[in-house]
Amino acid sequence: MIDLLVTRDYYVAAFLLLGIGTYVMIAAGNFVKKVIGMNIFQTGIFLFFIASAYLEGGTAPVLSDGGPYVSPLPHVLILTAIVVGVALTAVALGMIVRIYAEYGTLTEDTLKEVRNSE
């Protein structure tokens, strides 16, 4: 198990990013910090998919006539996921701006108190 962790350090980095992102999303009370945690989590997912698509000695199917081929599908999916992630971040930050304009706060607990007092 230790040998696997030492030779596949990108998996360790991916799971650290997933853990940090999850912790920030759950523990942070500020909405901007939650969005940052979501982006860190997404980066961990991207790294995991790209690392799992790596093939030692693999080549692109178009460029070679033999040998192991690398599937381009995970890379295409990650490009699509990056675009979706940027759009999601933009929408979330737009909503955060509206929340701040309406309620004057970005913390979850204060917003709950303000909403309950209305």
Image (cartoon, rainbow, N blue to C red):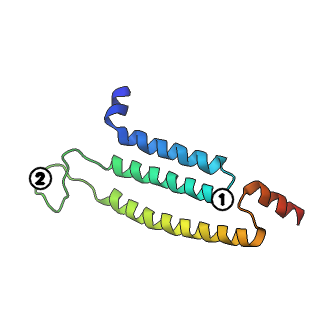
Could you tell me which residue is drawn at 79 percent across and 57 percent down?
110
Could you tell me which residue is drawn at 45 percent across and 49 percent down?
44
* In-image side of 71 versus 36 (left or right): left
Assign a secondary structure to mark 1.
helix
Depicted 7 relative to depicted 19: above or below? above
In the foreground, 67 or 93: 93
Image coordinates of residue 80 in percent, x first then y, are 41, 65
Image coordinates of residue 45 in percent, x first then y, are 45, 51
Image coordinates of residue 52 in percent, x first then y, are 35, 47
Q: Quadrant of the N terminus?
A: top left
Q: Amino acid at mark 2?
A: Gly
Q: Amino acid at mark 1?
A: Phe
* In-image side of 64 versus 8 (left or right): left
Q: Rate crowding at label 1 as few (under 14), some (14 to 19) or many (20 or more) other CA atoms within 10 Å.
A: some
Could you tell me which residue is drawn at 66 percent across and 67 percent down?
96
Assign a secondary structure to mark 2.
loop
Residue under numbered circle 2: 66
The picture quadrant where one finds residue 98 is: bottom right
